[in-house]
């Protein structure tokens, strides 16, 4: 049924420069019709490749841009939908999520967001792919200076004793294991593998955590869970320097294991 519909749709595509591909459940191009879960239409646009992925009911699942027709490096704005409704949106710079990514509820309203450390492109900006850039820069600056609202002292990078989770590593492992639940969509669209995201944040001298952002990415849905585990979790034990508690930066790696079906 899917293949019959798929073939009919492509007959309707008349633009000669439109590339047409079958995709497996992991959004990888495949020539095996039995593996097809989605399909992709793409075409060259201002030096990059614009694409839209569809499910078997012709509903948009993903859209955005790649650097070329091999679909290896994502650039510019991207959006992910599920069952015809927006799920999350954000921007890639040279294959890396950058800046704010927004998550939507069933009514299409933003209910949460996460921030990735901003990446600088090695290439020239792509015309038409940088809308609202100045607004996002202002939001990014506010996040990065969030820890200055209550405490204007310097945030240390290197200290005698780093900030740590109350109760130590065992308590952290126990806490994080309760927070990291896998959404069904992650299990359905990602191969069994080990994934990780490194999060950086500031722990103030009173243990309050703020300015939380991801340095790298596993997949946005898991990254958001990791961010919130720190952002909405308990206070940390502050860093120690020169016989007193101080405000300091901290990095924490969080790993996920996508199990076999």
Image (tube, helix red, strand yellow):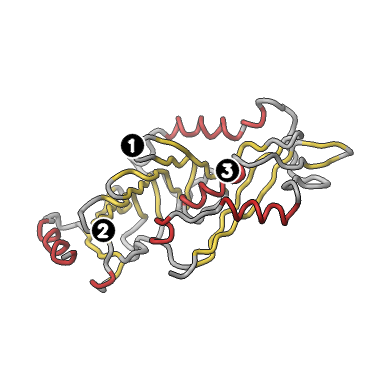
Depth order, front residue of 15/189: 189
Q: Position of residue 24 (x, y in %)?
A: 31, 66
Depth order, front residue of 204/216: 204
Q: Position of residue 69 (x, y in %)?
A: 31, 60
Depth order, front residue of 155/43: 155
Query: Which numbered tag is attached to residue 213?
Result: 3
User: 33 left or right of 79?
Assistant: left
- Above or below, 243 against 169 in this view is above
Give the mark nearer the N terminus: 2 vs 3.
2
For mark 1, give the secondary structure.
Answer: loop
Query: Which numbered tag is attached to residue 107?
Result: 1
- Above or below, 31 against 95 in this view is below
- Above or below, 7 against 135 in this view is below
Which quadrant of the rendered structure holds the N terminus? bottom left
- Residue position for label 2: 40
Depth order, front residue of 227/21: 227
User: 42 left or right of 189?
Assistant: left
Q: Are marks 2 and 3 in contact (CB under 8 Å)?
A: no
Residue at 46 percent across and 50 percent down: it is: 221
Residue at 56 percent across and 43 percent down: it is: 228
For mark 2, give the secondary structure.
Answer: strand
């Amino acid at each position: 049924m899917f293949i019959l519909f798929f073939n009919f749709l492509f007959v309707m595509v008349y633009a000669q420069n439109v590339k047409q591909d079958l995709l497996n459940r992991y959004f990888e191009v495949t020539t095996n019709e039995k593996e097809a879960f989605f399909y992709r239409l793409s075409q060259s646009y201002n030096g990059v490749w614009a694409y839209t992925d569809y499910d078997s009911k012709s509903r948009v699942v993903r859209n955005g841009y790649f650097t070329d027709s091999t679909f290896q490096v994502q650039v510019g704005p991207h959006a992910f939908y599920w069952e015809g409704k927006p799920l999350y949106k954000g921007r890639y710079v040279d294959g890396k999520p950058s800046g704010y990514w927004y998550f939507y509820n069933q009514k299409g309203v933003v209910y949460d967001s996460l921030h990735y450390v901003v990446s600088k492109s090695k290439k020239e900006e792509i015309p038409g792919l940088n809308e609202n850039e100045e607004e996002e820069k202002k939001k990014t600056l506010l996040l990065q200076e969030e820890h200055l609202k209550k405490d204007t002292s310097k945030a240390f990078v290197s200290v005698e004793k780093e900030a740590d989770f109350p109760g130590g590593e065992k308590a952290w492992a126990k806490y994080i294991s309760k927070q990291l639940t896998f959404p069904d969509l992650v299990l359905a669209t990602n191969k069994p593998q080990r994934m990780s995201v490194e999060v950086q944040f500031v722990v103030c001298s009173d243990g309050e955590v703020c300015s939380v952002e991801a340095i790298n990415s596993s997949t946005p849905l898991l990254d958001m869970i990791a961010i919130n585990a720190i952002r909405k979790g308990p206070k940390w034990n502050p860093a120690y320097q020169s016989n007193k508690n101080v405000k300091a930066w901290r990095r924490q790696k969080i790993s996920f294991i996508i199990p076999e079906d």
